[in-house]
Amino acid sequence: MFDFDCPLSCLETSYTHTTNRLAVCLQVDFARPLEEQGPFDVFLHKMTDLIVKAEQDDAGDSAEVGLFRVFESYMNANPQTIIIDPIENLKKLLLRHRQYHLIATSDACLHDKVFTPPFVRLIASDSSQMLRELRLAGVDFPVVCKAQEAHGSSDAHRMMIIFNADGLKSIKVPCVAQTFVNHDAVLYKVFVIGEKFHIVRRPSFENFYSFDLPPIAFDSQNITGSQWLEDIPVSRPPIAASSVPDVPAVALDPEIVTSIVKGVRKQFGLSLIGIDLIVDKTTGHYAIIDVNAFPSYDGVTDFFPHLLSHIEMIVWQRDRHLSANHHSVHLKQPTGLKPTARIISNDLNPAIARS
């Protein structure tokens, strides 16, 4: 799906803010051969849900997966087309335990003030076995339990906070359990667009100091209002949703955030991502708790001009590479996009086509 804040109509004719070159947004029609609609300079997409379905053994014959296979076939036949973001790199994000391992071993976590909270993949349904696995992995209560798939279904955003061993009986496996870190009710969404990033503060959970609490189920996309808690026992006192304070508890260090963005981008090979950060109330260290592909960019001003600038740069970099390898390519630093470049899109994907 398109996640641009502006409607499709405002994207149909746009100028890149660095070069004033025209970019026109059209729609790809998967009912027609892609070869008739290209050739494409850049194919911009958000197909994480389709990638998940295509990875599942029992989904190979679905119509949606069929469209994805058409896309794959075209890209394999046209290797000079730039895909934003590369499919194989996006696959690194799809399973949370793999994603968290890659975060923990990335350059981002080489900084002594950056970490990802301890985590473990839980498969066994026996709560005693779960407890042993948590202890072996160094995962302490309270723990946040998340679906092992980070994309592909509504369950990817449904989570549960478990405060004690008895609460483990409420867990649906398989899942990923991660230590909950008190963070003064502030979540930082770091929206990355190539070399640029924007930070937006969002409300989150208040700090927890008691372990004598029943599980809390919630939707991570809706921690903003009175309905963000789900399945709370009636005997339990209500917990009000947090609001972001006017002044953040901790002013983020731009050098540390820049280091995190560079490290995460390098590890995953992605340019359009959202990084969820919290600041440990006790240590002041930065915890990376999730990385998302092509996020909403809600709250980011001038998203589309930044996106076009990023596209221009990567097309120019590609053309420079082709020129260095003695291909016949006309270069004009730093544009990359042709004056009549077209941005092609539909519900599945936008692309940039050469005229």
Image (cartoon, rainbow, N blue to C red):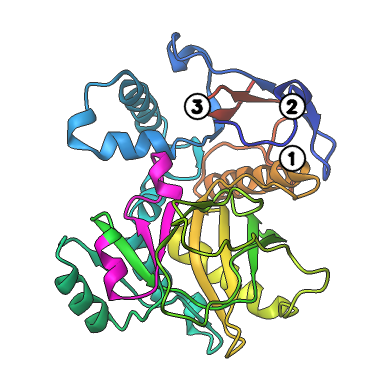
Residue shown at the point (23%, 64%) measured from the top left: 122
In the shown orientation, is residue 161 left or right of residue 340?
Answer: left
Q: Amino acid at mark 1?
A: Phe
Residue wearing tag 3: 348
- Residue 31: x and y, percent? 44, 9
In the shown orientation, is residue 35 left or right of residue 347?
Answer: left
Q: In the displayed orientation, state which residue is furthest to the top.
A: 32
Q: Amino acid at mark 3?
A: Leu
The quarter of the displayed image where residue 168 is located: bottom left
Identify the mark at residue 11; answer none if there is no mark.
2
Camera-side residue of 285 and 194: 285
- Disc 2 packing (10 Å; few <14; some 14–19; many ≥20): some
Question: Which of disc 3 and disc 2 is earlier in sequence?
Answer: 2
Identify the mark at residue 304; answer none if there is no mark.
1
Residue shown at the point (40%, 54%) measured from the top left: 93
- Residue 328: x and y, percent? 56, 36
Instruction: Answer whether labels 1 and 2 touch (C-beta < 8 Å).
Output: yes
Q: Amino acid at mark 2?
A: Leu
- Distance between the Cα atoms at labels 2 and 3? 16 Å
- Residue 101: x and y, percent? 34, 70
Question: Which of disc 3 and disc 1 is earlier in sequence?
Answer: 1
- Distance between the Cα atoms at labels 1 and 2? 8 Å
In the shown orientation, is residue 60 left or right of residue 322?
Answer: left
- Disc 1 packing (10 Å; few <14; some 14–19; many ≥20): some
